[in-house]
Image (cartoon, rainbow, N blue to C red):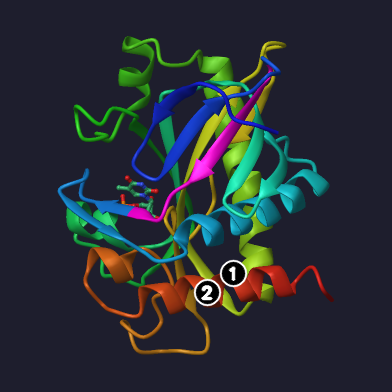
Amino acid sequence: MSQTEKLYEGKAKILYSTEVPEILLTVYKDDATAFNAQKKGQIKGKGEMNCQITAALFEWLASVGIPTHYIDSPQPNQMRVKAVTIVPVEVVVRNIAAGSLCRQTGLPEGQVLPSPLVEYYYKSDELGDPLLTRDRIFLLDLVTPERLVEIENMARQINKNLQKFFDQCNITLVDFKLEFGIDTQQNLLLADEISPDTCRLWDKNETDPQSRVMDKDRFRKDLGEVESAYQQVQQRVLAQFKK
Ligand code: TMP
C-alpha cells in the first residue's frame, strides 16, 4: 500500500493517509526523545523493532478480545491502522512503583503496588502532558463519564493480559502508557503503540536495578546498551508466537 499525504509527524512516528479513507499508514522512526523532547537521539533499528513488537502484541490482544486499530504490517517499520479519533487522554497503568510515581509520592522504586494504579494524563505536548484528575477530565470535556469507565475497564483488562504475556517472556511489566481511539461507529479501540518506548520492562533474570532495565529508561538515564535491550524484548516477544 502506498502512502499518500503526510497527516502528522510525531516524535516517534509519522502518520500518512492512504487511498482508502478509513485506513492510515503509520511509519515508525528510529528517533527517540525524552522529557518532552528536551533530550533527543536515535536508537538504531528502533522503528522496525517497536513496529514489530506492537504488531505482535496488538494481534495477540485482539485474540483475547481487546479491539485495536491494528490491521497489518506491510513493511517491518510500517503499520496499517484503522483511522480513529485519538482520545486526548494518555492512560498509564502501574503495577510497580517507578518513574514519576516515585518522584511525586516518595514511594521507593520497585515497590509492588497493592493493586494496579490507573492514571490519566492530558495529551498535550504544549502543556507537558500533565497528570489529570477525573474532575479535570470532565471540566475539559475530554471524554464522557461513560467512556472513561469503558477506558478504565479496558486498560485493566489489557494490563492483566500483558502482565501474563510478559511473564512468559521472563519480563516484569512495571508500568505502561496506552492511547485509545474512537472509530466512525463510536467503538473504542486500543491505538498507538505498546513497545519499550511506552512501557517499563524489567528482566526477571537480572536483580541489579540498572542491568534489569529493558526499555526507554536506558535512553532516558544514559544506561547504555539501548539497542540490545530493545532487541532482547523483540526476540522474547516474537518467540512466544513460535511455540
Ligand atoms: P512516568 O513514570 O514517567 O509517568 O511514565 C509512566 C509510563 O508511561 C512509563 O512506562 C513510560 C510511559 N511514558 C510514555 O509512554 N510516554 C511519555 O511521554 C511518558 C512521560 C511516559
Whether residue 234 is visible, yes or no, is yes
On whether ligand 1 comes within 8 Å of the CB at mark 2, the answer is no
Q: Is residue 28 magenta?
A: yes
Badge 2: residue crowd in 10 Å (few <14, some 14–19, many ≥20): some
Badge 1: residue crowd in 10 Å (few <14, some 14–19, many ≥20): many
Q: Main secondary structure of the magenta part?
A: strand
Separation (CA) of disc 1 from disc 2 = 5 Å
Amino acid type, residue under disc 2 in the picture: Gln
- Residue 182 marker: none
Whether residue 94 is visible, yes or no, is no
Q: Secondary structure at mark 1?
A: helix
Q: Secondary structure at mark 2?
A: helix
Q: Quadrant of residue 66?
A: top right
Q: Residue furthest left?
A: 38
Measured from the top left, where is residue 208 in percent x and y? 35, 89
Measured from the top left, where is residue 64 in percent x and y? 80, 48
Residue 42 vs residue 24: left or right? Answer: left
Relative to residue 124, is residue 43 depicted above or below? below
Measured from the top left, where is residue 141 in percent x and y? 39, 10
Closest to the observer: 182 or 242? 242
Q: Is residue 115 magenta?
A: no
Residue drawn where x is 45% and y is 79% of the image: 228
Quarter of the image with the N terminus is: top right
Residue 65 vs residue 89: left or right? Answer: right
Closest to the observer: 59 or 201? 59
Relative to residue 144, is residue 115 depicted above or below? below
**Residue under circle 1?**
234
Closest to the observer: 31 or 191? 31
Amino acid type, residue under disc 1 in the picture: Gln
**Residue under circle 2?**
231
Magenta stretch: give its range.
22-31
Residue 96 vs residue 122: left or right? Answer: right
